[in-house]
Image (cartoon, rainbow, N blue to C red):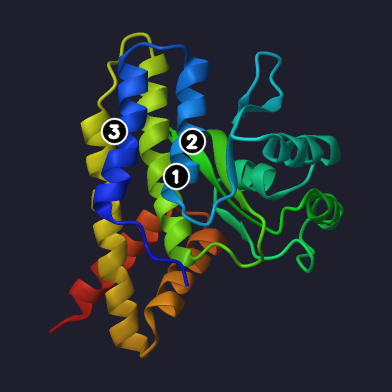
Amino acid sequence: MNTEPSVAELTAAFARLQSTVLSQESATSAVHQLAQVAQGLIDSAAGAGVSLQGEDGRKTTTAATDRVVEDADDLQYELGQGPCLSAWETVSPQRLEDTATDQRWPHWSAGALRLGVRSVLSTPLIFAGEPIGALKVYATTAEAFSADDERMLGLLAQAAATLFGAARAPKTSPQPDTALESALTDRREIDMATGVLMGRSGIDEESARTRLMDASRSQDRTLADIAHQVLEHDRTSKP
């Protein structure tokens, strides 16, 4: 079982990213920094990458921590299938437990397995309600990523997308503190909703979080929206 990264670790990781963007370094440097931050934040990650839309309109890997990430991503673009593309297109996180057995993207999984990739976690980068890319981490072991890892990568992606999107907008100044505060507020609501489900259904924490994520995917809504809905229902149902 992975140990959930602390809020302090997330804050420190985001601070590294924030300093790169605010120092007005190139966009390429900032995106590479995001990949490195993601790999450092998720302990079991062997590599990380960021996919964005290129000038020609095609999805492309803008940053990768190693060649294996680049090769695994190139295979997705070539085949038109894979967890990163699905995260981008469905605007929902994708967790692949084992490329040796997962059949959602069979051709890509077979190729990734040959590259040594066994599990993947990918989450969309969303700005102003629109997906602008995807952030992903790879591992060389099966079942490397937990529900907590999925949640934490989503928080990093949420805050980073807000920071990048605001920095690119010509008349908008980036507000990194607000971005991270919003992400952490969402996290607190998700924690509270997890507790509500545990108490209501008599299930453990992992199962409760999985239930929230399943609802997020099936309803095509953010995890924060689902958590807020659970909390609102809990408040209104109390006498």
In this image, 78 relative to 181: left or right? right
- The reply to whether residue 173 is in sight is yes
Label 1 close to label 2 by CB (< 8 Å): yes
The answer to which image quadrant residue 192 occupies is bottom left
Residue name at image x 76 percent, y 65 percent:
102
Label 2 close to label 3 by CB (< 8 Å): no
Q: For the C terminus, which image quadrant? A: bottom left
User: 187 above or below 196?
Assistant: above
Question: Marks 1/3: CA distance?
Answer: 13 Å
Instruction: Please state which amino acid type lies under the numbered disc 1.
Output: Gly
Compare marks 2 and 3 and give the one earlier in the sequence.
3
Q: Position of residue 85 (x, y in %)?
A: 68, 42
Depth check, front residue: 232 or 7: 7
Q: Mark 3, residues whose alpha carbon is within 10 Å: few (<14), some, or many (≥20)?
A: some
Residue name at image x 57 percent, y 41 percent:
48
Please tell me the numbered disc located at residue 15: 3
Question: Marks 1/2: CA distance?
Answer: 6 Å
Question: Marks 2/3: CA distance?
Answer: 13 Å
**Disc 2 on helix, strand or loop?**
helix
Q: Position of residue 131 (x, y in %)?
A: 53, 35
Q: Position of residue 216 (x, y in %)?
A: 48, 60
In this image, 124 relative to 155: left or right? right
State the residue lying farthest toward the left.
Answer: 239
- State the residue position of label 2: 36
**Disc 3 on helix, strand or loop?**
helix
Residue name at image x 73 percent, y 48 percent:
82
- State the residue position of label 1: 40
Residue name at image x 48 percent, y 57 percent:
150
